[in-house]
Amino acid sequence: MTSGPTRPTGSTDSTGPGGSGVPDVTLDDVRDAARRLAGAAHRTPVLRSRTLDTRTGTRAFLKCENFQRAGAFKFRGAYHALSRLTPEQLARGVVAHSSGNHAQALALAARERGTRAVIVMPADAPRSKRDATAGYGAEIVAYDRYTEDRAALSARIAQERGLTLIPPYDHPHVIAGQGTAALELLEETGPLDVLLVPVGGGGLMAGCATAATALAPGIRMIGVEPEAGDDTRRSLAAGHRVAVPVPRTIADGQAVETPGELTFAINRRLVDSVVLVTDDEIRAAMAFAFERLKIVVEPSGASALAALLAGRPEPLPGPAPARIGVIVSGGNIGPDRFRELLP
Amino acid sequence: MTSGPTRPTGSTDSTGPGGSGVPDVTLDDVRDAARRLAGAAHRTPVLRSRTLDTRTGTRAFLKCENFQRAGAFKFRGAYHALSRLTPEQLARGVVAHSSGNHAQALALAARERGTRAVIVMPADAPRSKRDATAGYGAEIVAYDRYTEDRAALSARIAQERGLTLIPPYDHPHVIAGQGTAALELLEETGPLDVLLVPVGGGGLMAGCATAATALAPGIRMIGVEPEAGDDTRRSLAAGHRVAVPVPRTIADGQAVETPGELTFAINRRLVDSVVLVTDDEIRAAMAFAFERLKIVVEPSGASALAALLAGRPEPLPGPAPARIGVIVSGGNIGPDRFRELLP
């Protein structure tokens, strides 16, 4: 494996791509995150399946972040962000708004780091997600999705209580943490031709692209979005961040209206393309994962696998099957919801 | 890890335990099987779960044979048995009677070794299992469960066509193959205090106990049977093989009426105890595996995990949590059946 970075490394305070003024994230930042995560995050397994290889005509390597602590890759970024706080910040605590995997991840990471998390959640969030978040010891502040602005609410809580806001994706430490998934994958597999990564806010992709393009310069970084939430694909085409209507998709973790500022600046530079999958293709991938891989994957977590199974991207030309990495990003779905969704 | 065997090694032709006249199986046999399986069988991952550790007060290591090829540990024994056939035997083909995981495993192993398998299956076997077995290229011979003797039928087919019969558990090469699961587990974890192994016909246990007691002399080997299929527990208590009525349990892979002759001779010597689990405990373990571990486990495959979750065996005394290995033995269950079974 090529191990040297192909572009200058620097701290997260350096000015980023295109002179945008936003901080950059480098392979060194991802490596530093990996050191901080050692012993705290799981080094998740990479699964192979001959059935999958045969069906897709590829050699596929599935990085199973559904086995990550708190059930998704989000723990990497949340824990890493907390590990970079000052003792004073850590003593005061953190706040985030999320009804999904970032909430659970931050709650668990806060407990592990000996601090407290306040999670701003919609009052009508699923009980299972509230229970899981509360179960990790977080304080939940409910808000009304129809009348209150969650960003303003969490900013106010941060201000009033002196808490540090930990955003779900648009933060260099969060991005560097997520990138450790690709770092581990490439350490285990060696060079890959393609890496398929689910894209919501773009933090996982930004981190993975940072690590993967530095470690394997020829790699094609391909993002996967649900058809209804194609904000990053549209933004890349437009050359600037655009917003889409509130996405209606089963892939709730990817139901994002516009890319993050920092994540988009990175992805614009490092991502080759974004492909789309339908909800039915996601359901089929969840069923395949259950029946053939014996793993539980939530809809957002299955989108990159769905793209591979649907033949998107098209097979690479060449004598040998392409070596394709696939991030299976999360598995937080209860049996009841799973039953509803499966084809 | 202690790596030296604690008892004389020998070939599988040596006279076995207690002068029974049945062939013995040794650590060397398991190691030889591991060499033959390298590159053919998956080296399955060992999963950890802090939730599981916290709930059970142990340090648990789950050897996930649900990720094995054809979805269960059975591939190890079937492939190893085929690898020991002569070229002439291999050219003629093999036969087995099974409606479960041994059928699929042998069908796949036969395809891999370039030969053909005939599988004798009840005419009313689930279509999914027939399809999977046929999908691996096996010839299926249906019989009437109510009027025909499957053992006699497969023996007749073997004789008439010159095929080699590959039994599901009561064979030294099958046992040695299954033992590679424990060999891999202990290589990865180092010494364990306890190893929990599902017991049906006893082949997985006999192989695992052979490897584990030689590698880690202080280890306690604990078998797990469904309450309704406690033939090995009763046989160990009686000191000889006894039969139970046809077991009614969701753990179809463990619905065995009496232990194998060779497996019992080995297990009698090496197994410390057998604990029982109810079908409801198995269902709860399947749900835990789905929700917390994100893995799909069939009922028989979940029985050892069920025992751990149910506090059986009782916690070992001592200052540190016991290090407990758990064989998660298979994951062949469709989504529909899974929905029916889940609590």
Image (cartoon, coloured by chain):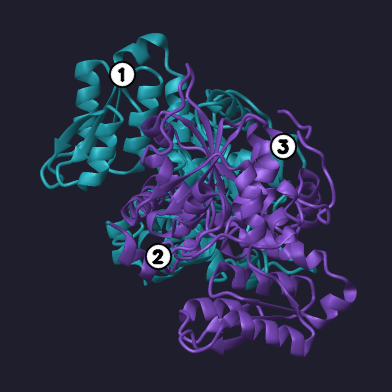
Chain colours: A purple, B cyan
Tell me residue A1's x, y (percent): 71, 28
Parent chain of label 3: A
Q: For label 3, count other residues whose C-alpha is less than 10 Å away and answer few (under 14), some (14-19) or many (20+).
A: many
Tell me residue B343's x, y (percent): 37, 72
The residue pinned by badge 3 equals A214
Q: What secondary structure is marked by label 2?
A: helix
Q: Residue at x 64, y 60 (%)?
A: A261
Q: Are marks 3 and 1 on the same chain?
A: no
Q: For label 2, count other residues whose C-alpha is less than 10 Å away and answer few (under 14), some (14-19) or many (20+).
A: some
The kind of residue tagged 3 is Ala
Up/down of A54 relative to B57, above or below:
above
The kind of residue tagged 1 is Gly
Q: Give the spatial CA distance, label 1 vs label 2.
A: 37 Å
Up/down of B343 relative to B83, above or below:
below
The kind of residue tagged 2 is Glu
Q: Give the spatial CA distance, label 3 vs label 1.
A: 51 Å
Instruction: Give the label, 1 or 2, closer to the camera.
Output: 1
Q: Residue at x 69, y 45 (%)?
A: A210
The residue pinned by badge 2 equals B227
Q: What secondary structure is marked by label 3?
A: helix
Q: Is residue A176 visible?
A: yes
Q: Is residue B10 left or right of residue B113?
A: right
Q: Are marks 1 and 2 on the same chain?
A: yes
Q: Residue at x 75, y 34 (%)?
A: B4
**Cβ–Cβ under 8 Å for marks 1 and 2:** no
Up/down of A228 relative to A246, above or below:
above
Q: What secondary structure is marked by label 1?
A: loop
The residue pinned by badge 1 equals B93
Please name whichever residue, A176 or A15, is drawn nearer the observer in this view of the structure: A15
Up/down of A287 relative to B151, above or below:
below
Tell me residue B323's x, y (percent): 69, 58
